[in-house]
Amino acid sequence: MKILSILWSQASTAALMIDGEIVACVSEERFSRKKNDERYPKQSIEYVLAEGGVKPEELDIVAFAGEVWSPRYILTRRWSTFSVQDRLREQHEYWYPVMYSGKNLFYYDLFGDKLDLAQYPGRWDAVLDFEKNNQGPYSADSIANYQEFRRQVVAHHLEIHPKKVRFIHHHLAHAYYAYYASLLPKDRVLILTADAWGDDMNASVSVAEDADIRVLSTSTNFMLARFYRSMTLLLGMKPDEHEYKVMGLAAYAKPDYYQGPLKIFKDTQYVDGLGFAYKKQPPDLYVYFRDLLEGYRFDSIAGALQRYTEDILTEWMRNAIATTGARRVAFGGGIAMNVKAMMELSKLPEVEDIFICPTPSDESIAPGAAYVSMHDICIKRGQNPLQVLKPFKHSYWGPPVSREEIQTIVEYASRNEKYVVSENPKEEYVAQRLAEGKLVGRCIGRSEFGARALGNRSILADPRDTRVIKSINESVKNRDFWMPFAPTILEENAYEYLVNPKSIKAPYMTIAFETTPIGAMCLKAGLHQADLTCRPQILDRQQNPAYYSLISKFREITGVGAILNTSYNFHGEPIIQTVSDAMRVFGQSNLDMLLLNDILIEKKE
């Protein structure tokens, strides 16, 4: 069975599953170089089919993630082009009059200057006409109309029969991805999903016993992710992108100072069994909190919000475990991107194990839709889905480095007096240079799926040396001063550096840990400077043998079985994809060395 699955929304993504195993998955932003690109993922679709050696006519199913779809934010390029000022304008000129005065405004009138009608497929006049007259994305007419629209777009693109196209519920895709792609034993697992919104819900509780997945509860009024999004804007950062900055800032807040804003959050929503209820329902989630939080420090607001997030999720999970008796947990949805909250959940005595798959936010519902589709096929055939569906062994599902492009870059660098080019560099040499404080860009093999660089599109540095933080920030990352970097830790050294008594697996930088005294000393450049926690990639040899070997050489030289690893990109750009991307950042930054498969390019000192 060959299944192509597609997310056409924020961070549009395509995935290909062959006989139960994901073989390729990539987001459109890696090709377009527009972060969070929401346009139809045409290049991603064409890549995953080529990588899998599948012709469009050979596809058995094309699965769109999401039953409900609205073109509003896609046509206005809201996720990839809106600034903080645009989002404030949206709050004041659209949502405020809609929520407080009941006005019926046409979104496209307000943001007509943002419309991109040239994007694929280019036939948008009928869509705009329909938008003027429909009753919102959840009307029966709208759902049917936009399912048919998406069906025809992909059928025309791939020249396939429209009957091959199906639509998968947003939260079902989150849940199946969280469960099937995880490394958890599959005999009894609690599956939680939580995000801002997806189809007709924003949270769910399910339990899986082998391949029997039962949905126990769904919620339409879970506001936590929306609270976080609105507070991100209130603090002057970009919603739907910079929530992680609020989480990073929160650790600097003093509990004594944030009790006031914490009470404001707690006076709104609380956990009610497996669902949620209101003490007081805000009329909106921006102006309401803006007025109540006036005068509180920025760090106190962030600290209170993070504490509230952890308290809500902790109580919800405890209730779900008590109800189901399942003590192993798979968590999906955008809320699972909050690595500090996932750390607090992992500490609960009721939790035996927890696993967070790569990039559990909406990008993941592209492969999730494939898991749902194949699961359903297995059930219809009388097969056990667990004998067919494969978990993720790694997340290197993107395009590989091009040999031809490497050759072009080598020819350019060899003619440039600034660079020294060498073939087949010894790992000992690269590790030694890292130990001397050099910054290394690594662009090797296939790229990682999702928001985390896991060695193949990474900037590497010595985790012991805090001077590299300033060096990387000033030249490449331009991060806010409070934001931490992260380490890759060899699996056999993780017990030395991390407080992880349950031996929770963390191969994808999706959960934080407290550090031991040795870890705080050896990894100090890769820790949060306020609380000494870290968001590690715990690496085993099979996951990425070449990367593992390089870090092993670094350990032989320094005694430290870890490396600082941050994504290879300039601030505000997607993670690099191609050799050309890597060379551009290398040439315009203070990176000292660039690894391109078996080629090393160094800047002359």
Image (tube, rainbow, N blue to C red):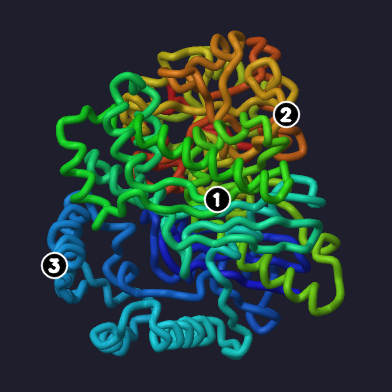
Task: Report the amino acid beneath label 2.
Answer: Ser
- CA gap between label 2 and label 3 equals 53 Å
Report the residue marked by disc 2: 503
Percent x, y of residue 388:
82, 64
Position of 360 with respect to 93 (left or right) is right
Task: Report the amino acid beneath label 1.
Answer: Gly
Is residue 427 shown above or below 545? Answer: above
| Camera sees residue 587 | no
Image quadrant for the C terminus? top left
Q: Residues within 10 Å of mark 3 (few under 14, many from 20)?
A: few
Q: Residue placed at 51% from the left, 42% from the top?
A: 313
Q: Nearer the viewer, residue 583 or 371?
A: 371
Q: Earlier in the sequence, mark 3 or mark 1?
A: 3
Q: In the rendering, which numbered label is found on residue 273? A: 1
Q: Residues within 10 Å of mark 2 (few under 14, many from 20)?
A: few
Is residue 144 shown above or below 62? Answer: below
Q: Nearer the viewer, residue 560 or 378?
A: 378
Is residue 106 shown above or below 560? Answer: below
Percent x, y of residue 382:
86, 75
Percent x, y of residue 336:
53, 45
| Camera sees residue 538 | yes
Q: Nearer the viewer, residue 273 or 167?
A: 273
Q: Earlier in the sequence, mark 2 or mark 3?
A: 3
Q: Residue placed at 35% from the left, 74% from the top?
A: 71
Task: Report the amino acid beneath label 3.
Answer: Ser
Q: In the rendering, which numbered label is found on residue 101? A: 3
